[in-house]
Amino acid sequence: MVLERSESLTACQIMIGDEKVEQVSEFLYLGSLFTRDGKCDRDIERRVKAGNSVNGALLSIMSSKNVSSKARLAIIQGHQHIYGSESWVWQKKHESKINAVQMRASRRSVQYRVCAAVCV
């Protein structure tokens, strides 16, 4: 893959032995998505979707009255360490998406409902 600013595609001929290496427009390496244009938009979108999926999977645990608030807090803190959003290279336009995932998880940990707060 060649990182480019323009839309044109630079052909790259890399051979290992007698085998030609396939040229791709994006690839996943150590959990990060690298694209031909060098931007991180698709990677952040993918990670936000993954965070939302985890939030959905944890919904039954986070809404259970049998789980202590200390345990919920540990889950939320662990969740942030898994995705490591504080170490991503992101722009201002990504901030609201990242914060929304974290706030959604935090609200669930304290069983806060937005509708209940707004409708009262």
Image (cartoon, helix red, strand yellow):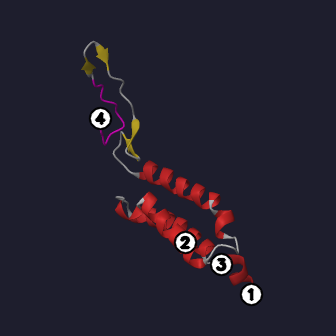
User: Which amino acid type is marked by label 3?
Assistant: Tyr
- Tell me how far mark 3 sits from mark 4, CA to CA: 47 Å
Which residue is under mark 4?
2
Magenta stretch in the rendered image: 2-12
Q: Which mark is residue 103?
A: 2
Q: Residue at x 48, y 53 (%)?
A: 47
Question: In the figure, is residue 50 to the left or right of 10?
Answer: right
Tag 4 or tag 3, which sits nearer the N-term?
4
The majority secondary structure of the magenta stretch comes to: loop
Q: Residue at x 36, y 24 (%)?
A: 22
Q: Magenta stretch containing residue 57, yes or no?
A: no
Q: Position of residue 28 (x, y in %)?
A: 41, 40
Which residue is under mark 3?
112
Mark 2, Cα crowd under 10 Å, few <14 / some 14-19 / many 20+, is few
- Tell me how far mark 1 sits from mark 3, CA to CA: 13 Å
Tag 1 or tag 2, which sits nearer the N-term?
2
